[in-house]
Image (spheres, helix red, strand yellow):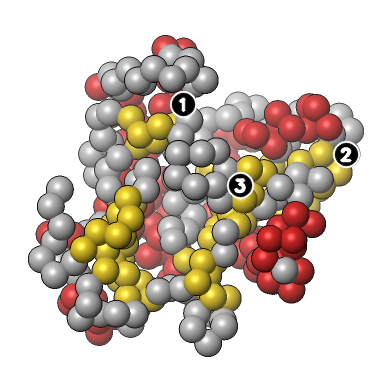
Amino acid sequence: MSDPAGWTRTYSGKVRDLYTNPEHPDRVLMVASDRVSAFDRVLEPVIPGKGKILTQLSLWWFGELDGMPNHLAPQDEWSAIPAELRDRAMLVTKLAMFPIECVARGYLTGSGWVEYQQTQSVCGVELPAGLADGDRLPEPIYTPAWKAPLGQHDENIPFQRSAELIGLENATVLRDLTLAIFTRASAIAEQHGLLLADTKFEFGAAPDGTVTLADEVLTPDSSRYWDAAVYASGTRGVSFDKQIVRNWMKEHWDPSSSTTPPPLPAEIVDQTAARYRELVDRLTT
């Protein structure tokens, strides 16, 4: 895609593209694409409508989390967003981003479950013995990760390591904000019949030093949601995200391989798109 008029692409991630414009020096245009990634690879084809859903849900959650400073620019500036991108773009304030992914877990699953089986802990947080995959934790835990350069794996780290990277005061603030937002969001999700198993947040420092919630927030790309009724029935691991893609990829390709991943079949694309649409409908209507 060519750059929109007046905007220059400065960064392309696995899903998002960032643009700057000299007429708006303190702002960044954050655009969510329809790209889908798994195992640190961008896959083909795209998931139709995914970028619009990620943006819609982030904006909804920013509204629900009133009182928490976020990176959205004032609405009277949003006319600067090119018309062709308005359904999947956010105009945001430039921040000094912390190199930490702030992960909160309310349930034991995913990489946390893998680590627990080996050490009975997750990122240095000791957990009770005898937990099973999908169990609710006694209380939410904070398990940060170091944000690796593009193309490399993020590294789960203990809290003390995050303090070494960004200072104890900053690390403590990020931990406390992460757990507070997670607790608040979990309660909202439960009102819609959903369980928020885990999520990751990103924060940056505003020019005045205020720690500010940034990037996407509580989307199916950054969070693991479960249907509360399905979970109560005894079925675990069915999530509203790209787990369908991950499962198919593991069955048809070796994630440790250096070969090009195979294209996703149409039914996997359709099922994934349907799960994303169902989540946004469940939360916002």
Give the quarter of the figure containing the C terminus.
bottom left
Between residues 189 and 111, which one lies in front from this camera angle?
111
Q: Counting other residues with Cα less than 10 Å from the Cα at mark 3, is it few (<14), some (14-19), or many (20 or more)? A: many
Say which label, 1 or 2, has the lower sequence index: 2
- Residue that protrudes farthest toward the top in the picture: 252
Horizontal and vertical percent for residue 204?
53, 70
Q: Nearer the viewer, residue 76 or 6?
A: 6
| Neighbours of disc 1 within 10 Å: few (<14), some (14-19), many (20+) | some
The CA span between labels 1 and 3 is: 17 Å
> Marks 2/3: CA distance?
18 Å
Relative to 17, residue 225 above or below: above
Considering the numbered disc 1 on the image, is that residue within a helix, a strand or a loop? helix
Give residue 246's mark: 1
Residue indicated by mark 3: 198
Mark 2: secondary structure: loop
Bin the neighbour count of mark 2 within 10 Å (Cα to Cα): few under 14, some 14-19, many 20 and up.
few
Against 121, residue 236 (above or below) is above
Please report whichever mark, 1 or 3, sits nearer to the chain's N-terminal start: 3
Residue 50 picture location, percent across and down = 30, 44
Residue, disc 2: 128
Q: Residue at x 39, y 17 (%)?
A: 259
Name the side, left or right, on which 159 lies relative to 207: right
First reached walking from the N terminus: tag 2 or tag 3: 2
Q: Disc 1 vs disc 3: Cβ atoms closer than 8 Å?
A: no
Give the foreground label among 1 and 2: 1
Residue at 49% x, 55% y: name it.
218
Q: Is residue 55 visible?
A: yes
Q: CA distance from mark 1 to mark 2?
A: 29 Å
How far from the left and from the top, in percent, is residue 115? 74, 32
